[in-house]
Amino acid sequence: MDIHNKGKIFVTCARGLQPFLADEMRALGVKPEAEQPGGLLANGTLADCMRLNLWLRTAHRVLFQLHRFQATNPDELFNQLLPLHWEDIIAEDGYLSVESSVDNKSVRDSRFANVRVKDAVVDRIAEVKGRRPDSGPDKTGVVLFLHWKHRDATLYLDTSGTPLSMRGYRLQPHKAPMRETLAAACLLAANYNGKGMLLNPMCGSGTLAIEGALIATGTAPGLFRSNFGFQHVLGHDEGSWEALRTEARSKMRPTTAQRIIATDNDPAAIAAARDNAAEAGMAECIEFDICDFRESSVPEPAKRALNLLICNPEYGKRMGDEAKLEETYKALGDFLKQHCQGYMGGIFTGNMKLAKRIGLRTAKRVPLMNGPIDCRLLLFELYAGTRKQKEPNPDSQ
């Protein structure tokens, strides 16, 4: 169990995000070697993990493998982990949290497996150092993650600590906010590079617009966080971490986007979006307006750049009444056809029945998960003359 040399890295993400995560990892010099359910495997060092935590937009966690073994029950789990040199990783006056994904017939509640992992770690440290680290669910110190399926177990150092979707800028969530990693994936799936117009009607708490501004300004999403799991590991090189942060800040630039415009007909949503954008340092990059999407102004599309209108309307699963939303989707399709020529249209939805009301043929359908909800990002190429099309078949699946 040597954390100071190259080892296995498992970067987790929501289902459907692997292609975008793979592109991000390659751009950061960490080549994915295999795809597994829930993420991508690679080889790398803790220094690579720091860089990934700082820059990845679509990842959930960055896990560094500590130990692979077999165990049929919690006692074997404890016995396998007790001899390892935990005192080299966790300080005796530190804090430990354990999480897990367990599919083992000997365990009904994964929290019991967490306790046995914790017991092995703190017992070893107490034996060597004479003191037990504190432990609990707060993730303010070292975080371990156990993946245990049948007999096969892998224990990871969770270098992220809290999920990377928790950027740190969302002060006001408003109603049913979109997860930041999902918003970033939608933008990347639409090939948004921060150079053309970005319009975000029905913006809610502003996540899509803010993530777009981060892309347009070259801002690393991890810059907003003050706490990562790797910072609490013994031997952590804080100087190297600060150097990475300094390098990331030096790459920030004035927005390359022509304009980023976020609108919503709910004043409370716009107030929340403004607060969140200010916390992210993006308030000056985004124009906010209180209006119905039908009344939104659509600037002339920038030349030689991707211009994107993207939104996440209600789709009747959590907030809206499906019958009432049919007219909204039809009006949204009419708005795209009549006012958005020269743009790429992007609509994220979990309701394909409502999507058919848009009345436009899709150029691309990207399957994504919003928590447990199977969703699609529907992309529409809105050429001049689009209003003449009438095929209402955005998704035949």
Image (spheres, rainbow, N blue to C red):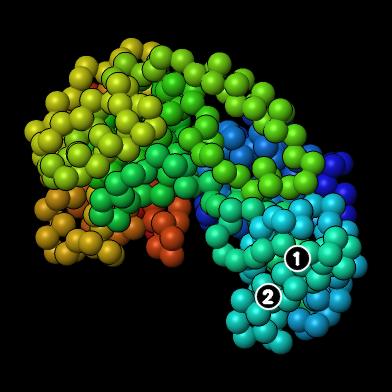
Residue 83, given in percent of the width and then of the height, sits at: 90, 67
Q: Residue at x 64, y 53 (%)?
A: 141
Residue 85, given in percent of the width and then of the height, sits at: 88, 59
Q: Residue at x 68, y 47 (%)?
A: 232
- Secondary structure found at label 1: loop
Residue under pointer 1:
132
Q: Nearer the viewer, residue 71 or 22?
A: 71
Residue under pointer 2:
115
Quarter assignment of residue 289: top left
Quarter assignment of residue 242: top right
Q: Quadrant of the N terminus?
A: bottom right
Does residue 273 appear left or right of residue 221 in this picture?
A: left
Does residue 307 appear left or right of residue 269 in this picture?
A: right
Q: Kindly tell me whether residue 114 is visible in this rendering.
A: yes
Q: Nearer the viewer, residue 183 or 347?
A: 183
Residue 388, given in percent of the width and then of the height, sits at: 17, 34
Badge 2: residue crowd in 10 Å (few <14, some 14–19, many ≥20) = some
| Mark number displayed over residue 356 | none
Location of residue 303 with respect to 57 vertically, above or below: above
